[in-house]
Amino acid sequence: MRIKETLNLGKTEFPMRGNLPVKELERQNVWAENKVYEQRQKLNEGKPTFVLHDGPPYANGNIHIGHALNKITKDVIVRYKSMSGYRAPYVPGWDTHGLPIEQQLTKMGYDRKKMNTSEFRDLCRKYALEQVDKQREDFKRLGVAGEWDNPYLTLQKEYEAAQIRVFGQFAKKNLLYRGKKPVYWSWSSESALAEAEVDYKDVVSPSAFYGERVVDGKGVLDTDTYMVVWTTTPWTIPGSEGITIDAKFDYAIVTHDGDDTNKYVLAAELVDSCAELFEWSDVKTIKVVKGKELDNVTAQHPFLADKQMVTMLGDFVTTDAGTGLVHTAPGFGEDDYNIGRKYGLAVFVPVDDRGYLTAEAGPDFEGVFYEDANQIALDKLKDAGLLLKYMPYEHSYPFDWRTKKPIIFRATDQWFASVDKIRDEILAAIDDVKFTPDWGKVRLHNMIRDRGDWVISRQRVWGVPLPVFYAEDGTPIIEEKTINHVADLFGEFGSNVWFDRDAKDLLPDGYTNEHSPNGIFKKETDIMDVWFDSGTSHQGVLAERDYLTYPSDMYMEGSDQYRGWFNSSLITSVVVSGKAPYKSILSQGFTLDGEGRKMSKSIGNTIEPSKVIKQMGAEIIRLWVMSVDSSADVRVSMEIMKQVSESYRKIRNTMRFLMANTTDFDPKKDTVEYDDLESIDQYMLVRLNAFVEEIRAHYENNEFLDIYKKLMNFVTTELSAFYMNVAKDVVYIDAEDSKTRRSMQTVFYKILVSFSQLLTPVLPHTTEEIWALLKEDEEFVQLSEMPEVTHYDNEAELIEAWGSFMNLRGHVLKVLEEARDAKEIGKSLEAHLDLYVSESNKKMLEALNANVCQMLEVSDLHVASIDEAPASATDFNDGVALTVTPAEGDVCQRCRMTTKDVGTDDAYPELCARCASIVRAEYPETVTEGLEK
């Protein structure tokens, strides 16, 4: 028999390399075949419910790394809740209507304007479902558990019916109106946009300063006076109806360059800066008046001879830039519209859906794209002698978030939901919600406080139709009975019925209306904003499915959803029930590349989850999610993923060591009771329980980065660097069934079980692989519960003693390292250690009730009083001094310790007395047969 064969060198089927890209998929198939998710739901019946309501991703294209961050985080939360006393069903969803799908069909060669609407919508539906299937497989491949066979889709009949009923609640509370007012208009999408569909970018616009000659100065201004107006959108001058000033500002009437025949009006505090800009000299102030004195002064429109501009008093004029007099076109801006209404101005909109100016703008502008119209306007001002200065002006400007094209503000007939009427109720509902991070509350509050009325109509076809009818005289019909009837039709046939049937066939049988004496009705052609679609999911899903709860316990999405889904869902929910649809909101930042840049396909810095999975496995993405502070923007790159894979390797190999050394351990008969455990094993069990308690608390508070940090610290510092190192001299060397070995195996096994359960929310593929090799009752770790925390009577004393020892051990490791560097010793087992300690440290070592020499991983140890420490000793000034010398004796060929008793048993000349005793007892045949190296 060889010496190696007398060692307990454990073996395990758990491989060093996980081969995750292959094995994960195999394991997922096993979960599906065994309906593990469904089994978990069955186990949790009757328990308190926790519902994380899934915000629907848009069904278009494969998932990106941001999707992975989102879905994995949700999965971690739901899996943890499911294993810790809650019934936590997870229903994934998809947002399946909207412009991007229409655009995809256009790219595929379909022209919706040349097709039957229902045929085009059928194609949209088919495309959307294909995308759902694609993304569903992507999410499942990440290991996300849920009702994948029964998700919610915003195109489902029952969902659309619920959405219509929510619309009916708005109508019932008189929150809906149709009006012509400026909205975000995307000429690239030919549709109105909601605030949530707009991004801002810095742009350079042509800033123009020009004069408008006074026609009626109201006794304050002469007719040889020009109002100096400023605009950054010269193309909107054809739509100009007035000039806005501030009642409280001082306005100066000035002349320049000795010309007294023409006077100019500017904000008094801007005269000097404007004079320099216009290259005026010899500027004289004729008089100064308050803005309120100029109210209703009229001036001549610079292009249109038959139009005069009225001067109005507003509250949005500033002196940060410009002249203090603002060009005002009620059809092209919200502030302009509001002040125009106050003064009874017309809403003039000489631009079409595609951004081209119409004949109403004048012959010079007709058929010209609005951006090109800027130059025409500047040329006309110059030709008329009215242009005082043109200069580029850099500012933030809104863009269509889908097409990435700039938008325009354009007054169109739209349906609006009044936010103003219920603003106080919405704001009050926010107070009942818990926000993580805390700043989310302020952000959502401010967005609701500052938002205007909600434009809910869209000029597209792929979406849920607005259930509005029009009588013969144009009166809108939004009655409870007509809306409910449409909801019933949608619930039975889907929303295509709106396009398949005439208006009369969509109304209740026998319906009459005084505004249609001839019984003739028309139906609305606009669809609803997709944010209304997804924003009603609390009714279409939470209230619809009896095993879910409304409100939900949590909404969790990216921080952009404070202006999107969090926002729209809150408004609709308050209208329906007077309360928020969620008890808590958890928001995340965006994913950036390794250099902190926004990810973009054009830059080529995107990370596809499929690529990471193919190379490393989904577990690496899941562990990465835990390794970042997702409350803010997070960085990700293949290099970062490789670093995370090293952490995974550390976790895996640590578990492998524990598994290899518990192969012969039967927890039912070999477990050592706590009181009988060795001191070090008691200490590690106490530390494990503290770890379990900390990790569970972090799960409860969704502190994922803290979980990752403490996991890696426990694995690296407490297990790998200490306990497992010490363990080798026990589990390898001591007799197989010895008390010391079984004591340590008891804790090893407990760590394996606890880790498997604790890490299942994060690394389910790996923990199931471990669990399959353990000797537990549950077939799948996902069907077990989170480990409970146990406290022991002596844990305070253990923590104090072993805590002090770990400090002393740190000193020892430092001195041993220095001795190695000086070539005085090789490995630590070649060392003899003289340890000089204070009385308190001596008592601490005694209190350990442990083999201190073994704990310090040296071959020989001598403990003496600190007073006996020689001058050559390394003194740490805390009651510990050390010297290291080579251990005397020979190296035992079995335990590798250097001792003086090697060969004292004649039968085993190469073994120390300890090893000889073990081998003689365990392998008596070797007494006569001997041992080979």
Image (cartoon, rainbow, N blue to C red):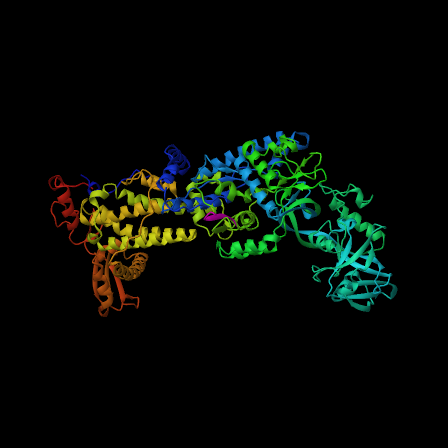
Image location (x, y in percent) of residue 789: 31, 52
Q: Position of 197 compared to 205: left or right?
A: left
> Residue lying farthest bottom?
867
Image point 65% across, 33% down: which residue? 503
Q: Identify which residue, 293 or 320, lies in the foreground.
A: 293
> Residue lying farthest right?
261
Q: Position of 317 compared to 676: left or right?
A: right
Q: Identify which residue, 176 or 253, lies in the foreground.
A: 176
**Observer able to see residue 391:** no
Image location (x, y in percent) of residue 544: 49, 40
Considering the image in quadrants, where does the N terminus appear? top left
**Observer able to see residue 139:** yes
Q: Which residues are magenta?
A: 551-558
Image location (x, y in percent) of residue 515: 70, 39
Q: Identify which residue, 804 or 403, lies in the foreground.
A: 403
**Residue 270 in magenta?**
no
Tell me where residue 821 sits by quadrant.
bottom left
| Position above or below: 267 against 237 | below
Q: Position of 602 compared to 360: left or right?
A: left
Query: What count of labels does the image hold?
Result: 0
Image location (x, y in percent) of residue 917: 14, 47
Q: Main secondary structure of the magenta part?
A: strand
Considering the image in quadrants, where does the C terminus appear? top left
Q: Identify which residue, 285 or 825, lies in the foreground.
A: 285
| Position above or below: 761 against 229 | above
Q: Position of 222 compared to 113: left or right?
A: right
Tell me where residue 30 sits by quadrant.
top left
**Residue 553 in magenta?**
yes
